[in-house]
Amino acid sequence: MSAEPLLAEAPWLTSGGTARVLQLLNANGEEARVVGGAVRNALLGLVPGDIDIATTALPEEVMRRAKSAGIKSVPTGVDHGTVTLVIDGHPYEITTLREDTETFGRKAKVAFGRDWVRDAERRDFTMNGLSVDARGVVHDYVGGLADVAARRVRFIGDPDRRIAEDYLRILRFFRIHAAFGAGDPDRDGYLACIRGRAGLASLSAERVRMEMLKLLLAGGASAATGAMAESGLLQSLIGGVAYTGPLSAMIAIEAALGLPASATRRLAALTVAVTEDAKRLAARLRLSNAEAKALDSMGHRWWRFAAKDEAHARRLLYRLGAERYHDRVLLAWSRDGGDVTSSRWRELAELPQHWTAPKFPLKAADFIARGLAEGPALGHVLTLAEDAWLAADFPLDEAALASIADQAAARVSRDQKT
């Protein structure tokens, strides 16, 4: 075990809401420490993120002390020992030390205790099993400090047992490795994930979606998904082909253009070749309506950009709007090899920045003036005229517009007579 003041000067620990919670719970025979991801992140020099605190105090005692101190408490998971304290609008999740008495996914039965070692041993990975007290002393019962230093994601104890407790840990293994690991995934953990892959079918689509989207945003997403694809794990999750090359290209394109990482764009690069892929994935992962529509739009005839014709690109920008257009171009670029030095692809991707589609200038009144009556025919002629206007590359001079209107009106009039 290691117990060194490695975070003694950390301002997030020694001041503000965290310090206040620790002071509140470190009294009258009880002890509290920050646990999990916040400790790992701080040791890696990253923003701590959400701060979770473990305590020897029972949930009722946590809420009693909070009330006495004028702090709002919310019993978010009392049966599992969790209370959320809200300080200055920021939530702090407080959980009583515990050990699992029965383990079956998220519905594990637990017993409360006062043993910090047993509490650490029930967690998933060694780098998540660290705790730090109010003095900045880091407590390590599972070899987490060495694994943080090596950026090695390793299961605590027997990997097969940890996975059987919750099969989502297979996805978490790759996601945590993508975010904080280095080199190849830990071999013992990797092989255990392969052995436990049948358990993935028992997971809810919502939980899989959440982990997949987080994984795709991680710095090592390309390598991690590649490892998952090589083992067959990725294909079983998405129910189709995994396109790891286009995903790597999409990540490189985002970086080259200075774009923030997009989980939806990256998911499309990894999984969507045609709109049927988008529909399958939306159902399989229960994507949000916005995510499903974005994937469907990206997958719709993206290959038409292969000719790299700017006139066609302008028409698509007009039809799709800037956001949908941009995502589809990037998908096409990633599937064309993702050469980030391609000036032509960059021009297509950046078209919305230097060209704004004009509004279609013809109105219903223009066709009523040409003898068409209000009704279905009026909507039809407007569609015909708009298509002709786009094909002519958005002319705005009166002569060209009059010619387009005359031809569209004449065509509809002929159709009505036949």
Image (cartoon, rainbow, N blue to C red):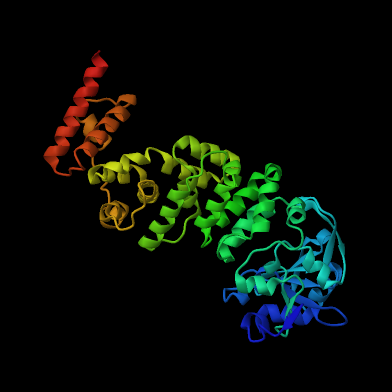
Q: Is residue 388 visible?
A: yes
Q: Residue furthest left?
A: 399
Q: Residue furthest top?
A: 418
Image location of residue 379, percent across then percent down: 32, 30
Question: Does 73 sit left or right of 190 as displayed?
Answer: right
Q: Is residue 286 visible?
A: no
Image location of residue 241, percent across then percent down: 51, 40
Question: Does 280 sit left or right of 33 as displayed?
Answer: left
Q: In the picture shown, does residue 89 fall above or below 280?
A: below
Q: In the picture shown, does residue 393 fall above or below 18?
A: above
Image location of residue 411, percent across then percent down: 21, 23
**Quadrant for the N terminus in the image:** bottom right
Q: Residue placed at 63% from the left, 83% from the top?
A: 10
**Quadrant for the C terminus in the image:** top left
Picture quadrant where residue 125 is located? bottom right
Question: Does 257 sit left or right of 118 as displayed?
Answer: left
Foreground of the two, 231 or 298: 231
Foreground of the two, 118 or 38: 118
Image location of residue 365, percent across then percent down: 25, 35
